[in-house]
Image (spheres, rainbow, N blue to C red):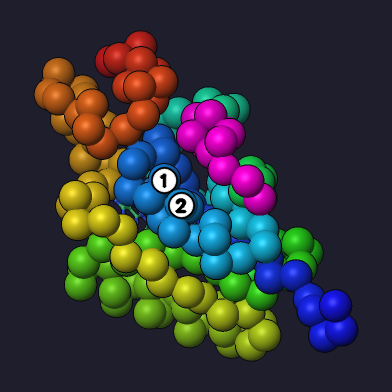
Amino acid sequence: MPGFSSRVAIYPGTFDPITNGHIDIIQRAAPLFDKVIVTLALNSDKNPLFSIEERIEMIKRSTSDMSHVEVAQFSGLVVDFAARKGASVIIRGLRAVSDFEFEFQMALMNRKQRPEIDTVYLMPDARYTYLSSSIVKEVAQHGGRIERFVPQFVLDMLKKKF
Ligand code: ADP
């Protein structure tokens, strides 16, 4: 098709572990692009509970039934990774106003690095507005109920950790 170029997006994050909130965002993004690359970012200062392999495995299992969704990992600048993959869009999830300030700063800094790449924000289903990987770990650690917030195999992995 003349003028057609494939629209690739990357969805970067720590995914420690992947939650139903992340999965909701991936499901919303997938139909909007030709390819969505869910990307484990390795250079975060966070001290992850799960290893790289465990996180990749959980992302792969969560997205195995989604067409044109791939899984990757990278360290370095997210915009450089996007460029390398031919992606013109970075996807991020926005839960509440509290996410806004940091995301705004990052989006503008990323735009300074590579103006051709834009960040697109998607809002999850309201059920997941207050959901984060940190809160899931906190509740799981104390034996609380999190089965509505993560897939079963993530629940099993969390049980093994605690
Ligand atoms: P990061 O360390 O990059 O913030 P996270 O794995 O915590 O990594 O989050 C990755 C992206 O997913 C971020 O844009 C974050 O706002 C979004 N996200 C995390 N949890 C949710 C959720 N419950 N609903 C929607 N988006 C979410």
Is 127 left, or right, of 155 in this rendering? left
**Residue count near mark 2 (Cα–Cα under 10 Å), binned few <14, some 14–19, many ≥20:** some
Measured as percent of width and height from the top left, residue 108 is found at 48, 84
Q: Which quadrant would residue 154 be assigned to in this image?
A: top left
Q: Which quadrant would residue 20 be assigned to in this image?
A: top left
Q: Quadrant of the N terminus?
A: bottom right
Q: Residue furthest right?
A: 2
* Numbered badge on residue 23: 1
* Label 2 CB less than 8 angstroms from ligand 1: no
Range covered by the magenta-colored residues = 58-68
Q: Give the residue number, with chain letter if any, for mark 2.
A: 27
The residue depicted at 54 percent of the width and 61 percent of the height is 31
1 or 2: mark nearer the eye: 2
Instruction: Examine the structure image and report whether residue 63 is included in the region drawn in magenta.
Output: yes
The residue depicted at 28 percent of the width and 67 percent of the height is 99
Q: Quadrant of the C terminus?
A: top left
Q: Nearer the viewer, residue 10 or 77?
A: 10
The reply to whether the C-beta atoms of the residues labelled 1 and 2 are less than 8 Å apart is yes
Name the secondary structure under disc 1: helix
Instruction: Examine the structure image and report whether residue 149 is included in the region drawn in magenta.
Output: no
**Residue type, numbered disc 1:** Ile
**Residue type, numbered disc 2:** Gln
Name the secondary structure under disc 2: helix
**Residue count near mark 1 (Cα–Cα under 10 Å), binned few <14, some 14–19, many ≥20:** some
